[in-house]
Image (tube, helix red, strand yellow):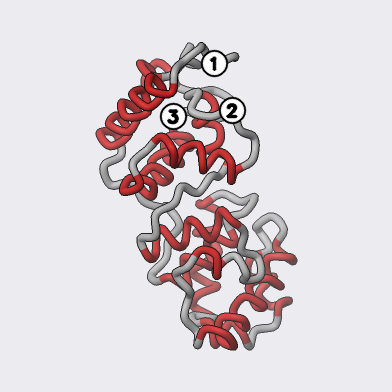
Amino acid sequence: MACPPETSEERKKRARAILRALKAAYPEARTELLHKNSFELLVATVLSAQATDKGVNRVTPALFARWPTPEALAQADPEEVGRVIRSLGLWRTKANNLVALAQRLVEAYGGEVPSDPEVLRKLPGVGWKTATVVAGAAFGVPGIAVDTHVARLARRLCLTGAKTPERIGRDLEALFPRKDWIFLHHAMVLHGRYVCTARKPRCQECPLRPYCPSAG
């Protein structure tokens, strides 16, 4: 649907109402990827590309039991890693990237995960979304990572007309307080996963319905 005419101030006011509703609905919003530290979160987020969190959570316990540290994973055979994660999409590419990523962590960063998203983006298999998620969830670096759920919600809520994740993220960051960016990402992911779903959005029970031009 086409978004109705709206001034920038009206959109910001509506965005503040959306944020309040999300805080009421998801006060403890956080990633559903199981992890114990920043390394495990980084690996799990890399694996989550074109895969569900549930799917990732099924393979990571065995993965981390066998290769619990960057040093261990750096020595792994990508084919063996692939056998552990082969239930996920793009598993061959992901296996190669994970071993190369671990090697880079060991060689360049002493086995520590960098907190700077720009540095994270230089690691194998790490794009803008993954870097933003890890920097925010592991280190508290503000940012709004945009996955398919966030992009869908942002457009349905008429908060952006942008197509690319980076541009959608910038539009959202202009509407919401910096201190709420990390929360907003996680809350929008949960809302998109369980309420504002792609095929059959549950509009009748949606707490954002009063502020959503697409509700129907």
Marks 3 and 2, how far apart in space?
Answer: 21 Å
Could you say whether the residue bearing mark 1 is in a helix, strand or loop?
A: loop
Q: Earlier in the sequence, mark 1 or mark 3?
A: 1
Kindly identify which residue carries mark 2. Answer: 161
Near-viewer residue (80 or 175): 175
Q: Residue at x 33, y 46 (%)?
A: 29
Vertically, is 6 above or below 64?
A: above
Q: Residues within 10 Å of mark 2 (few under 14, many from 20)?
A: some
Residue 85 location in percent, x, y? 63, 65
Q: Residue furthest front?
A: 8
Residue 176 location in percent, x, y? 37, 38
Callout 3 amino acid = Val
Q: Quadrant of residue 210?
A: top left
Kindly identify which residue carries mark 1. Answer: 3
Could you say whether the residue bearing mark 3 is in a helix, strand or loop?
A: loop
Q: Quadrant of residue 163?
A: top right
Callout 2 amino acid = Gly
